[in-house]
């Protein structure tokens, strides 16, 4: 077996909640957690760095995220009201 094809076992310490949520999402794509980690690591090699922007949220964003997690300043929405609102905002084309 070529070096590129060889699999190697690794131990990772992961956030248990995030791991379980990720596994549910990945399963919809037919991917295992190992598949996703291998895709990520392959992209790191190809990009020669993290393959997406990593940003630290500013103070305002941190405050808003905290409020949302606490259920503050959050509106309850449903799909039907969003569709109605979208239809009202669309004006027919003038001919």
Image (tube, rainbow, N blue to C red):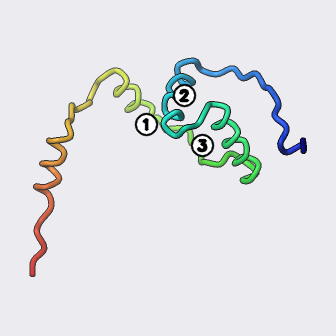
Secondary element at image label 3: loop
User: Residue extending furthest front?
Assistant: 1
Of the image marks 1 and 2, the number of the one nearer the N terminus: 2
79 relative to 11, above or below: below
Which of these two is toward me, 87 or 8? 8
Secondary element at image label 1: helix
Name the residue beneath numbered marker 2: 23
Which of these two is toward me, 71 or 33? 33
92 relative to 3, above or below: below
The residue carrying pointer 3 sits among few (fewer than 14), some (14 to 19) or many (20 or more) residues within 10 Å by Cα, namely few
- The reply, left or right, for residue 57 in relation to residue 51 is left
Query: Residue visible at 19% across and 45% down?
Result: 82
* Foreground tag (2 vs 3): 2
> Where residue 94 sits: x, y (%)?
10, 77
Query: Residue visible at 34% across and 28% down?
Result: 68
Of the image marks 1 and 3, the number of the one nearer the N terminus: 3
Secondary element at image label 2: helix
The answer to which image quadrant residue 40 occupies is: top right
Of the image marks 2 and 3, the number of the one nearer the N terminus: 2
Name the residue beneath numbered marker 3: 54
- The reply, left or right, for residue 92 in relation to residue 35 is left
The residue carrying pointer 2 sits among few (fewer than 14), some (14 to 19) or many (20 or more) residues within 10 Å by Cα, namely some
38 relative to 70, above or below: below
Name the residue beneath numbered marker 1: 61
């Amino acid at each position: 077996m070529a070096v590129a094809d060889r699999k190697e076992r690794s131990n990772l310490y992961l956030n248990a909640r995030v791991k379980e949520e990720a596994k549910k999402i990945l399963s919809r794509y037919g991917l295992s957690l190992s598949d996703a980690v291998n895709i990520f690591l392959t992209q790191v090699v190809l990009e020669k760095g993290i393959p997406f922007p990593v940003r630290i949220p500013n103070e305002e964003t941190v405050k808003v995220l905290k409020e949302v997690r606490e259920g503050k300043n959050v509106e309850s929405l449903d799909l039907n009201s969003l569709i109605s609102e979208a239809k009202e905002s669309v004006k027919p084309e003038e001919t």
